[in-house]
Image (cartoon, rainbow, N blue to C red):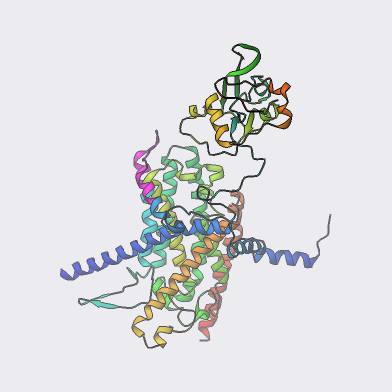
Amino acid sequence: MTELGLRLAVSLAQIAAVMGIVMLTVMILTLAERKVLGWMQDRMGPMEVGPYGILQPIADGLKLFFKEDIVPAGANKFLFTMAPILAMVPAMIGFAVIPFGPDLTIDVFGISVKPFVISDINIGILYILAFASIGAYGIILGGWASNSKYSLLGGLRSAAQVISYELNVGLAIVGVLIMAGSLSLVKITEAQAGGFWHWYVFAFPAPQIFAFVVYVISAVAETNRVPFDLPEAESELVAGFFTEYSGMRFAFFFIAEYANMVLVSCVAAAMFLGGWNAPYPGTILAQLGLEGFAWIEGVAWFTVKVYGFLFLFFWLRATLPRLRYDQLMKFGWKVMLPIALGNIVVTAIAMYIYNQFK
Amino acid sequence: MTQTTGTQRLIGWLKTITFYELLVGMKATMSHLLHYRPITLQYPHEKRTLPDNYRGMLALLRYDDGTEKCVGCDLCEAACPSRVIRVVSAEVPGEPTKRYSKEYYMDMTRCLFCGMCVDACPVDALGMTREFEWAVYDKRQLHLNKPQLLAIGDRSFPVREKRLELQHPNVAFFNVAFKHVPQKPN
């Protein structure tokens, strides 16, 4: 009984730490996005709150917290309340299987704990995909429950877009799964150790470069970001599915969007870019004899990869205009899907031949 | 019809599959990020220098001796395209040949700062100042009357020498003298 209690306490501590880090990242992202977009457009971004506007996320949070919470007349109150929660919980819950650092095991009062992954379940990536699909419910129900035509249109667009592009995300990572032979993100990351030529983007015998491109594009579409931001196209649909939302409910949708960005970046880093593995074999800290601190380097590399990915999101947003709806569908079904399917066939054949001659 | 050769089609196809056009755009945004030179000003803290012919808040002007320039001719009211100005003209008491504006109202909520009233004024009684920070909480505060407009003129044009052609006695005749203010010595 004490062991169960201890395990529970350790797990809760891990969850609290990961949630804290994710929320901190979301705060940093809201500021970083505005700053990077500003710099790319010869502006300054927020400059008023704190030196160079670095306290802007706190001011935004306070503002949203104290705003009036409006439920529009004719809205379905229950679903209207549920939708932001349905959007945010799946975005947060996916971080449970993300390995943030090396697969260490430490003993805490007699029980073994993996400090850098909350739960190393053997169907990790499947779990993430399943919950990402549930996240679409939040958007669709939020759009429907608002009793507003713009929200409904945004929700419908989101439904079509998520169906089209989650398929591509799922198919793009199948190549990696064939090569790794596992669904666990920890095992997939470990299989990529030993230099960047072992990362699955470049790995022999079937480099997943096409799958990577398909994954990146589909991930941008799945998180409803520019240039695939049709569900919240502000020039056409006011704000899309969260037109009628205000205050903390709006903040929940907002946090969910950014948490989803972080999640897809983490998955991309873990599956294609070697996760916590450095682009050179081993770690510098281990070479220097600091074996006990090698995990710092691993976590740092993971952070660098994730933030590089997030920067790509901002960069795309600053550059590209929004796709038209038929272009979006055509691109998803006629271009991305055949590439992903072709990649699976090629990878499967290459792995079969490789395993015959190994 | 231009005939596309096989090489051109191959190049076009290669550009499509490598997202060449997107990469050109992304290079442009990245170059702006790397050569970061913001063109915005942090407005309340730093203000841009206004051009010399800036058309800001309207004001009624006085001569150096404190006399109002306005002769109540109503030409500004006629020139105004937005019907901002309302002039109530009257004779100067005791001097039947002289007129002045008894009341002068401007509804600045409608003003579009075209400057036509300033052009129309025969005695340069109207001026456009360089004030532009006139945001108010109550729009009724933008319905200005004569003392307010004169006050704006006083604080914006502290030096108001008569234009040379207006110093001629025939023209100066139209100006209303304030009896309690000592005349300009000349």
The front one of A14 and A179 is A14
Question: Relative to residue A155, is residue A216 depicted above or below?
Answer: below
**Residue B143: percent from the left, percent from the top?**
52, 26
Quadrant assignment for the N terminus of chain B: bottom right
Question: Relative to residue A90, is residue B90 depicted above or below?
Answer: above
Residue at 58% from the left image edge and 32% from the top image edge? B153
Question: Relative to residue B100, is residue A23 depicted above or below?
Answer: below
Residue B49 visible somewhere in the drawing: yes
Magenta region: A60-82
Residue at 40% from the left image edge and 88% from the top image edge? A288
Q: How many marks?
A: 0
Residue at 60% from the left image edge and 52% from the top image edge? A323
The question of residue A96 being in magenta is answered with no
The outermost residue toward the front is: B186
Left/right placement of residue A69 relative to residue A234 reads: left
The question of residue A72 being in magenta is answered with yes
The front one of A312 and B82 is B82
Question: Relative to residue A205, is residue B164 depicted above or below?
Answer: above
Left/right placement of residue A97 relative to residue A31 reads: left
Residue at 63% from the left image edge and 32% from the top image edge? B127
- Quarter of the image for residue A299 reads bottom left
